[in-house]
Image (spheres, rainbow, N blue to C red):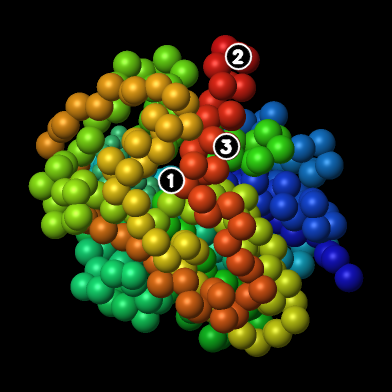
Amino acid sequence: DKFPVLVTGGAGYIGSHAVLALLDSGWPVVVIDNLTTGFRWAVPAEATFVQGDIADRALVGALIADHGIGAILHFAGSIVVPESVADPLGYYENNTVKSRSLIESAVRGGVKRFIFSSTAATYGIPETVPVKEDAPTRPINPYGWSKLMTEQMLRDASFAHDLDHVALRYFNVAGADPAGRAGQSTAGATHLIKVAVEAATGKRDHVDIFGTDYDTPDGTGVRDYIHVSDLAAAHVDALDRLVAEPGASHVMNCGYGRGFSVIEVLDAVDRVTNMTIDRRVSPRRAGDPPALVADNGRILATLPWRPRRDDLDTIVADALAWERKLAERG
Ligand code: UFG
């Protein structure tokens, strides 16, 4: 039987795709979002929307009680690595301090399940790639730390209280809903595929390649790009798992277990768009590891989840379709 779930950050990029996946699977959804980076229109009419702050204890407590919330999916947070280097205290406030408040609201409100948007940035520069969940977590930026601290709070809270959790460590999320219902809309994007499709639709005149001297096959950074709809589906499976097996918590990588270089991604964008997008070699960006690829053995062993849209050209094509929609909208 499906209880209402509270989705924080449900008006944002990944959160809005998770809302669609939950609704598609028959879960009633309540979204809380403060709309600092999200969009009201990104939340479908079938979901209840509340504009507010996840650290507003009175508001969240009332939402949990009034709707009979049985699980919280926590997407709300700040996600730009260089921004976290410039404003670490802002990142700890938004990602760590506010998460602490939300977890306390969950415990006080008797919510037994919590799914948390964590990140591969918790690994820092991994010694071994693909990286497993039990690899050392040594973040190299405040963003990674702010998420790792929340993972730790969840571990401790799950031990002390009747609260099970799944921390999903996302690799590089890209693409858009294949049916065109949602996509990445935030202005000032820094993510490679988003930047490249913006260039393809004339929003920028070139793409920078940040570093060509890494110890990787072609010298550019290698990442594990995962389609946002596959990632959203992983959350629904994680929720099912928490319901089926009370008393168990998990940390799981969300990636496909293969990496593409910046040049391979830009080649894919050229292929899909039938264009030659201007590339400029630029210096390395601060805080970038050379290669970050998931060992996804654990999620494959734990959940029924399987990669579905893992073809790079498919990811790029879906991102491009959404970008064109945004461009038309103006
Ligand atoms: N890159 C470019 N040019 C750009 C943008 C990015 O060359 O204009 C390169 C980066 O140097 C890196 C790769 O493309 O090698 C991917 O960079 P992104 O900015 O797209 O993503 P990051 O890997 O820096 O970070 C993302 C998320 C983090 C998450 C991480 C996990 O933003 O939240 O993936 O892998 F932790």
- Residue drawn at the location 58% of the way across and 52% of the way down: 309
What residue type is disc 1 on?
Answer: Ser
Say which label, 1 or 3, has the lower sequence index.
1
Q: Quadrant of the N terminus?
A: bottom right
Residue underneath mark 1 = 78
Label 3 CB sits under 8 Å from any ligand 1 atom: no
Give residue 328's mark: 2
Question: Percent from the top left, x then y, of residue 68?
Answer: 82, 62
Q: Quadrant of the C terminus?
A: top right
Say which label, 3 or 2, has the lower sequence index.
3
> Marks 1 and 3, how far apart in space?
24 Å
Image quarter of residue 293: bottom left
> Marks 1 and 2, how far apart in space?
28 Å
Q: Secondary structure at mark 3?
A: helix
- Residue drawn at the location 28% of the way across and 41% of the way down: 263
In the displayed structure image, the side of residue 128 where residue 274 appears, left or right: right
Q: Work out whether 250 lies above or below 221.
A: below
Residue underneath mark 3 = 318
Image quarter of residue 16: top right
